Image: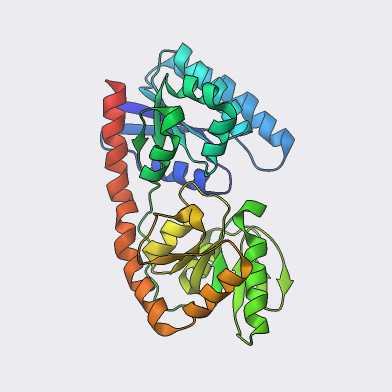
Amino acid sequence: MRTVLHVGPSNTRGGMGAVIRLLVDNPPEGWNAEVMASHADGGVIPVLRAWWKVRRDLEARLKRGNVSIVHIHTATRWSWKRKMGLIKIAQNAKVPVILSLHSGDFDRHCRERGPEVHQICSSLHTVVLTELWKERLAPWLGESSVIPNPVPDVEISKKRRRTDFLLMGRANPMKGQSIAMDATRILRARGKDVTLHLTGIEVDEPGIRGHGWVDGAEKEHLMNTCGTLLSPSKWEGLSMAVIESMARGMPVLASKASDGVFEKSGQIVELEAHAFADAMEQMLEGKTWEKMSTSGPNEARFYNLVKVIPLWGKLYDEVAM
């Protein structure tokens, strides 16, 4: 059986790590999957240790043989710099490379480092998350494939509190936590008894609860009981929180960073607190909320794991020939 070796931040918090773990746990038919972590949470020292280790481990693994494809997952900035070194290791070992681009600001990265991006990507097979990203990045990437992030089977919950809003994401200003909190304060000033649940950060004030990083049962509880997902991000590749919420029947209010991801199961909102407050107030009304909730699982079928994994199998077969 052929082997694909995934290399990326598989053990870290966030969407990219979640995607890598799903792909490793669900390899295409006829393929075995292995993984090497290229990143670690916790600051500069753990990151450097992970970087030094993955270089040694990748060289050693490829020398042992029986790796048909090295599938590298990257964002921008330092993630990109680290991955360039790993790409060279794989190419020196004469193993085909697939490069998955996960970052929602890769177009900015290309404007800054276009010639370098073109040189690297022209030597391997590049995969982007949406048709919009393929079109947007074509001047730098040339040809690329489109394979979306996968969503596993999830529970469609009917026990949701429409007055509870959820923002899932790591502690990063680009996720828009400040906009969501200001929007909640505006609604509460209007006399609406709403609650905002935030992950990734810790905060406690009337109507706003920061849960810190959540996983497992706590994540499931929030995803199954909150009424609407907020995604006021400055940029996104393809938000796992958005597509998983759609699959669960939880409506989505998102910035233009998620434009094209949904049609009826969410709404694109101007990236401003009053605009989000107005949209959130609309979700308190039954008719609008019900229509979006009902549409979500059907629209999310496009991202279902059982549909996405065969796309990877087809690409692996082509690249490994």
Display coloring: rainbow
Q: Is residue 270 left or right of residue 51?
A: left
Could you tell me residue 230's position as x and y percent?
53, 65
Residue 57 seen in render: no
**Residue closest to the eye, 216 or 212:** 212
Residue 221 drawn above or below residue 135:
below
Q: How many circles with numbers are drawn on the protein? A: 0
**Residue closest to the eye, 46 or 129:** 129
Quadrant (top left, top right, bottom left, bottom right) of the N terminus: top left
* Residue at 61% over, 85% down: 193
Could you tell me residue 294's position as x and y percent?
33, 72
Residue 15 drawn above or below residue 177:
above
- Place residue 25 in its image quadrant: top left
Residue 249 seen in render: yes
Residue 45 drawn above or below residue 282:
above
* Residue at 44% over, 66% down: 267
Q: Is residue 128 left or right of residue 17?
A: left
Could you tell me residue 81's position as x and y percent?
60, 26
Q: Is residue 177 left or right of residue 129?
A: right
* Residue at 46% over, 77% down: 160
Q: Is residue 276 left or right of residue 300?
A: right
Quadrant (top left, top right, bottom left, bottom right) of the C terminus: top left
Could you tell me residue 130's position as x and y percent?
38, 44
